[in-house]
Image (cartoon, rainbow, N blue to C red):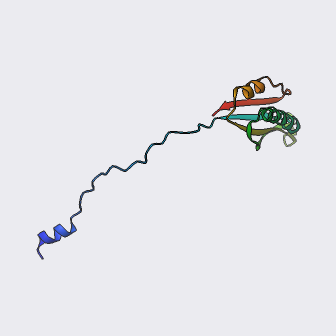
Amino acid sequence: MSTKETTEKTAVKPRVARAKAKAPVTPKKDVIQKLRIRVRAYEHKILDASVKQIMDTALRFDATILGPIPLPTEIKKYTVNRSAFVYKNAREQFEMRVHKRLIDIMNPNAKIIESLTNLSLPSGVNIDVKMM
């Protein structure tokens, strides 16, 4: 075998970029909208009562509801010295717990949104509403 024959056998063929066949584009039939409601409070009893009130309001207008989904409780801990000078090892610890719930309302209509905006909830309950 000559060197010319061996180089022809071991020569690497260059790759040719090929266009990938794409799937035919189908139009979206149903666009699913979500109204995502995040409810936060320091006391879980008040939080659960307000979530129940939100769900009752949404169910009154025949809405599809996912939830309430309990999210992890956010715990903030603070350590404070009891004394200023000599008794440095004497300390107090305080914590704040923030309880959270998540509610998704699928395909909300105008009546549901209007009734949720007119809803009066107890003080200390924070609500974040997003349209997705």
Instruction: Tell how many labels.
Output: 0
Tell me the residue at 72%/30% (across/down): 128
- Left or right: 97, with 23 as reference point: right
- Left or right: 94, with 31 as reference point: right
The answer to whether 130 is drawn above or below residue 7 in the figure is above
Residue 69 lies, in percent from the top left, at: 76, 43
Task: Please identify the quarter of the rendering in which residue 82 is found.
Answer: top right
- Residue closest to the eye, 30 or 104: 30
- Residue closest to the eye, 122 or 89: 122
Residue 39 lies, in percent from the top left, at: 77, 34
- Residue closest to the eye, 113 or 11: 113
**In which quadrant will I find the C terminus?**
top right
**In which quadrant will I find the N terminus?**
bottom left
Tell me the residue at 24%/57% (across/down): 14
Residue 15 lies, in percent from the top left, at: 27, 56
Tell me the residue at 21%/64% (across/down): 11
